[in-house]
Amino acid sequence: MVCDATFYGKKKDKLGTLVFKDILSGEILMWKHVQSELTKDYKQLLQRLLDIGYEVKAIIIDGKRGLYKAFKDYPVQMCHFHQKKVIQRYITMHPRLEAGKDLQKIMYNLTLTTQTIFTKKLNEWYEKHKDFLAEKTINPDTFKESFTHQKLVSAYKSLKTNLPYLFTYKNEKNIKIHNTTNAIDGGVFSPMKKLLKIHNGFTKSLKLKMVDDYLVSYKKK
């Protein structure tokens, strides 16, 4: 099962929809219109599925904070695409610092390696650059300390946090698990947003109705 939320329309409208999709059948299982992406909504939809007898074997997510805990009873896979995007945002596509270049090389092999090897490479990277990462800068106005290379530190922390969930699709050999949320991002949300763009002048209520109709009639692509 894969789940994610998407938002559309004007930012002030706060129009969004949280969707749960069955990877194997391609069926849209359940959805809920939301104003913001909250863990409680994910938990609510999951519980509704369980209440009607749906069996959850694994869940693919985009790494939203709080979902690992919310889905702790199930194998969880962190989307590789989103993880790569997070690291790219921190170190850019063309890192200048040696630590950034080294981390980029490790990320290139994310889908080609195992959890054991990836963990080893990441730990080696940290040992090599830990003094550099620990450097602090003092703000002359507030006299507060902060990491000089905060973005690199954040990139490392992101990988350490998500590491237990990056290789579930390989570790859980008896379950067919995708390593990205593309089945919902590209397969459901992308055409849905194109449809909404065509009818950009619709009111909020009409847009929500259009989304409902789209999801009801959705077929496996």
Image (tube, helix red, strand yellow):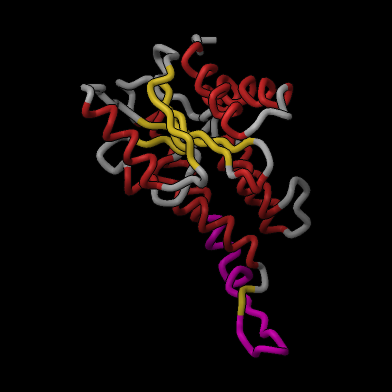
The reply, left or right, for residue 84 in relation to residue 65 is right
Quadrant for the C terminus, please.
top right
Image location of residue 183, percent across then percent down: 52, 22
Image location of residue 136, percent across then percent down: 63, 79
The reply, left or right, for residue 185 in relation to residue 174 is right
Residue at left offset 60%, top offset 68%: 133
Image location of residue 150, percent across then percent down: 63, 67
Q: Nearer the viewer, residue 118 or 151?
A: 151
Residue at left offset 67%, top offset 58%: 99
Q: Nearer the viewer, residue 126 or 82?
A: 82
The image shows residue 103, relative to residue 172, as above or below, that is below
Q: Quadrant of residue 135?
A: bottom right
Magenta span contains residue 126 = yes
Image location of residue 37, percent across then percent down: 49, 45
Number of marks drawn: 0
Residue stretch rendered in magenta on the structure: 124-145
Magenta span contains residue 89 = no
